[in-house]
Amino acid sequence: MLKDITIGQYFPGDSVIHRLDARFKIVFSILAAAMLFTAQNFIGLGIAAVFIIMCYAVSGIRFRMILKSLKPIVPLIIFTGVLNLFFIKGEEILLSWWIITIHTDGLRTSAFMVVRIITLITGMSLLTYTSSPIMLTDAIESLLSPLKKLRFPVHELAMMMMIALRFIPLLIEETDKIMMAQKARGANLDAKGLIKKAKALIPILIPLFISAFKRANELAMAMECRCYRGGEGRTRLKKLKASILDFLAFGLILCVFGIIIANNFAF
Amino acid sequence: MTAIETKKLSYKYGIGTPFEIKAVDDISLTVEKGSFLGIIGHTGSGKSTLIQHLNGLLKPTHGEILINERNIWTKEVNIRSIRFEVGLVFQYSEHQLFEETVFRDIAFGPKNIGLSEEEIKARVMRAAQAMGVHENWLSRSPFDLSGGQKRRVALAGVIAMEPQILVLDEPAAGLDPYGRDKVLTKIKEYHENSGITILLVSHSMEDIVKYADKVIVMNKGGLFLYEKTDKVFSHADEIVEIGLDVPQITRLARLLKARGIDIGDDIYTVERAKARILELLGKAKK
């Protein structure tokens, strides 16, 4: 059923990583990505990978979740792997059969790319696994706040994201209900053929849109009743606060980054 | 003749996840053709899950369901045809309206059956009349109607399929007292005129006992009580114990009984209470 879909991959917890300030976590994720692209050899990549796996261990997120986060990008991994394998040419030929030749350099680059993508996605997923969507939107708003000077509607953007996230489960539930109701009236939802399929969606989409607009209207009214007027001068219930922990983590990441850069020059 | 029979029916949500819940637990019951059955229970007692089994929207995890003495989950039965035999009206049914005109919305069900134009028209007219949907609303948009009117249009949309069994989940929920009465009386009238089987799910004991001739009380997914309406309140203590309400007048009768004035265990309407009290007073005078 539609209900079984989960949106947002937040796993509540109380680990050190969960307690880090979400703003710092976003910066850390960007740094980790930069780290992965700075690493020029397997040793550097290995250091970064071990670091990310250690973060997972500390966060208490099960390693099975790494596989889950990789699932959607399997095609990309295969595509990158195969492409590099066949099209990178070097001096040494590893294997030659019919029109296929695989060079040692090709194999190396391909493996390097695949490991890089996997560690990248794994690292990024840790961010969404350990920070709630609300924490993330708050953090994005705070990080983008310098753009306010350029009249970019940062607060409005964050508010929109937050409302959207809040309403997704409701809309899913509603779709489920409407589908049931129309099925009970004999609607044939598994009709074959494009036009028939599109037609079968009308009895579901129209009530869904109507209720979504109604909800939006009511929400806007309720916000206005409480004198909501945008971001200026608005205070928060939960303030993002940087602690020593965040700076320590920052230092640690910079250390790892440094090691990787040093490693590039050493080999 | 039995219209509905369930044998050891159970249903679990979220099998294989940490959130597995048994919503319906081992329910066996039979419903006679032509009866008006009330189903009552707390939120989460499994009422809604149970009724979604009756037209095959949910497939039981265990057990069987027989509609008109036919097991609906066998290969020979097309589950879509069961939906036309058992009309199911959901809570807040006005949310299912989508067509441009009231007429076309009511016609959606009959059209899905694949009836001829004339038959569809005849059925829409009959259903509209049965639910008190005014003839000059038929060409209007359903979204221009009031809440209670929309609700009756939605009900007509299911009734127009002319099912032999009609299942209604809280048809009066969220309506004002006038809309409430209107919807429920129309349903009762329709039951009397058509002789079909009706199952009415409600939170309100007063509504149930006013219209139903048999009552099912559900608790925690199981069948707690299945009795003729007259006999339900001889179990009043148990009903109160699981946290359901009994009608005000029944409460009065029980208080009187506790003080030594027994006017009977089958009091759930003011009229009957009045008759009994007058009877007792008459006796006392003599």
Image: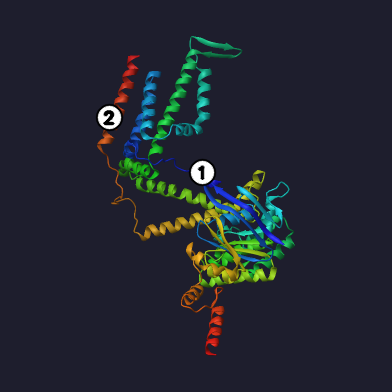
- Say which of B86 and B38 sits in front: B38
Q: Give residue B159's quadrant in the image.
A: bottom right
**B191 sits left or right of B143 in the view:** right
**Residue that sits furthest to the top in the current view:** A92
Q: Quadrant of the N terminus of chain B?
A: bottom right
Q: Residue furthest left?
A: A244
Question: Residue A31 appears at what percent x and percent y?
Answer: 34, 30
Q: Quadrant of residue B172?
A: bottom right
In this view, B30 is above or below B20: below
Relative depth, front residue between A38 and A165: A165
Looking at the image, which residue is at 55% across and 11% down?
A: A95
Nearer-N-terminus badge (2/1): 1
Q: Chain of mark 2?
A: A
Q: Is residue A41 visible?
A: no
Dot 2 corresponds to which residue? A251
Question: Circle 1 sits on which residue?
Answer: A5
